[in-house]
Image: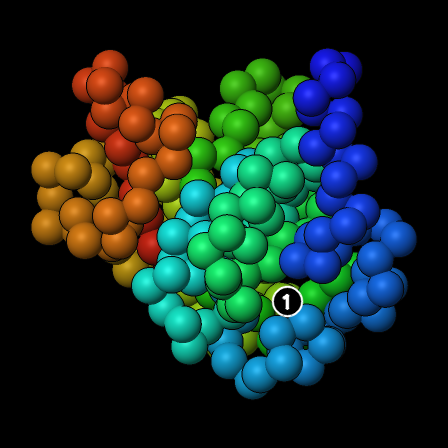
Amino acid sequence: MGRAKLKRINGLEERLNVLQEGHSLYDSIKSNWRKGCFKNENPIILELACGKGHYTTGLAKIYANKNFVGIDVKGDRLWVGSTNALEDGLKNAAFLRAQIQHINHFFDTDEVDEIWITFPDPRPKDRDIKRRLTAPRFLNLYKDLLKKRGLIHLKTDNLPLFNYTIEVLEERNDVKILESTYDLYQSTLITAHHGIQTEFEKKFLQNEIPIKYMVFQFVD
């Protein structure tokens, strides 16, 4: 591990807007995000595998009346997102250092209003299918955390992952796909990305790779 990366990771211990092991709220934040972390009763939106938190901070700037939590396990990336949030004075943006499969340890049933999954690892190998963030076991987690009719957004450049997600969703009788496009920037859904682009997204667009997008919700 490089010295700069290690310095960033160690620096997270001093960040009040990053909840990781050792933070005073880490073990008591479940069902306590609004009062314990944000000090308000506003909706909570998650960005899963957020990396540097482009959507966490970007959406927080647009929607001051909503709370945003970026979740990732990589501390050096969270350092970047948390730094941007602090520099922009965003009181409605926070970060959680945790693995996505453990998010039910940190969020209670019906505590979350909306979820963004932006350019997740497509996990192309067959043995890794269950690790895809739209695999059935993850969808069941999201269903438990989300309030009724809460939205889930997926943005990806990866066609196999997008098609896989559609197949998984269509096999369920408790999900409704509300919007879907294989080329976001050439569709009427263009405003759905709020003008926010991740670093990955910018690279894909430069290489003329269409961005896939969908939004769905659990209806049962």
Total numbered badges shown on the rendered structure: 1
Task: Report x, y in % for residue 47.
Answer: 52, 51
Name the one closer to the observer, 36 or 14: 14
Is 4 situated left or right of 176 in this image? right
Residue shown at 66% from the left, 58% from the top: 17
Residue type beneath disc 1: Asp
The kind of secondary structure element at disc 1 is helix
Residue shown at 58% from the left, 63% from the top: 143
Is 156 situated left or right of 132 in this image? left
Measured along the vertical axis of the image, is residue 51 above or below residue 191? above
Measured along the vertical axis of the image, is residue 112 above or below residue 136? below
Measured along the vertical axis of the image, is residue 174 above or below residue 180? below
The image's colour scheme reads rainbow
Is 102 situated left or right of 118 in this image? right
Residue indicated by mark 1: 144
Camera sees residue 208? yes
- At label 1, counting other C-alpha atoms closer than 10 Å, the crowd grade (few under 14, some 14-19, many 20 or more) is some
Residue shown at 53% from the left, 19% from the top: 124
Name the one closer to the observer, 162 or 210: 210
Specify the quadrant that holds the N terminus. top right
Please identify the quarter of the rendering in which residue 86 is found: bottom right
Task: Report x, y in % for residue 180.
Answer: 26, 48
Residue shown at 57% from the left, 38% from the top: 80
Is 99 situated left or right of 42 in this image? right
Task: Report x, y in % for residue 102.
Answer: 76, 50
Task: Report x, y in % for residue 4.
Answer: 69, 21
Camera sees residue 50? no
